[in-house]
Image (cartoon, grey):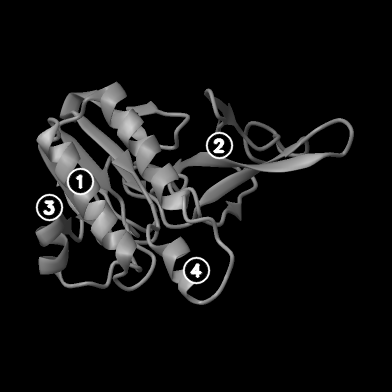
Amino acid sequence: MWLLPQKGVWWPAESMLIVSDLHLAKAEYFRSQGLAVPPTVDFQTLSTLTALIRQCQPKQLMLLGDLFHSAPNRAWADFKAWLKDELSAGLEEAMLVRGNHDKAQDEVYRDMGVWVLDMWENQGVVLTHEPDDPIPSNARIHLCGHIHPAAMMRGKGRQSERVPCFVQTSTGCNAGRRLILPAFGAFTGMHTVEPKRGMEVYVATDKEVMGPWRAAPDARVNRGGRR
C-alpha cells in the first residue's frame, strides 16, 4: 500500500484508492447559516480526488466514512454528478464504509452510485471508519480515519505548523497494524497527535510523505524494559 501526499492510500493489488473523511456539503451548510465560507472547497476536494483517480486509475474507490458532513443540500447533487462522470470514465465501483456523519438511508447513497458497508474485509485486511470500531481478532491490517490526525512541525525560530499525517499503531489483535488516514476533505479540522511508544507518524506535505517519525526513546529505560 502506498501512502500518497494527497492524503489517500493506493493499494495496487486490489486496484483500490482509499480516502477518508471528505466531509462534503459542510461548507454549503455553513453558508446556509450565514457564515462566510468559500463556495469552492468541495470543488477543491473533488478536483484533488479526480487527479488521484487519473494518476492511479483504480477500479475501486473506497471512502472510509464521513462522505457528507450535513443533511442533503446542493453539494450532494454535485457529488452525484461527479461520481457519474467518474464511473463513465472507467471507475468500476465506489464504496462507503459508513461513518458517524453518514446518516442517510442506504438507498440514498445507492442512488448516487455508492455501495454502503459497515466494514470491508479481505484476507486479514479490514477497513472501517473509526479506530475503535470492533474488528476481527485475526485482522492483520486495519485502515480507518475519523480523527483527522495532524503532526505539529516546529522550526528553529519557534515557528510551528500543523500538517496532516498518517498514524500507524498496533491493533492489539495478534500484533496487527492499524493505519489512521488523514482527512481528505479541504474543509475539515485536524487533531494533533504526539508520537508515543509503538506509534509511527508519516507527515503528508504537498509533494511527498515523510517518515516514519517515532517518539524519542526514554533514556531511563534499558532494552530489558527496566529502569
x%, y% of residue 203? Answer: 57, 33
Q: Tell me the residue that label 3 is attached to.
A: 113
Q: Amino acid at mark 2?
A: Val
- Judge the density around disc 1: few (<14), some (14-19), many (≥20) Cα neighbours within 10 Å: many
Q: Amino acid at mark 3?
A: Gly
x%, y% of residue 152? Answer: 69, 43
Q: Quadrant of residue 123?
A: top left
Q: Residue at x 31, y 57 (%)?
A: 65
Image marks 1 and 2: residues in contact by CB distance under 8 Å? no
In this rendered view, identify the residue nearer to me: 79 or 193. Answer: 79
Q: Amino acid at mark 1?
A: Leu
Mark number, residue 201: 2
Quarter of the picture holding the C terminus: top right
- Judge the density around disc 3: few (<14), some (14-19), many (≥20) Cα neighbours within 10 Å: some
Can you say whether 119 is above or below 123 in the image?
below
Task: Say whether residue 125 is visible.
Answer: no
Q: Tell me the residue that label 4 is attached to.
A: 31
Secondary structure under tag 2 reads strand
Image marks 3 and 1: residues in contact by CB distance under 8 Å? yes
Mark number, residue 83: 1
Dot 3 or dot 1: first in sequence order is 1
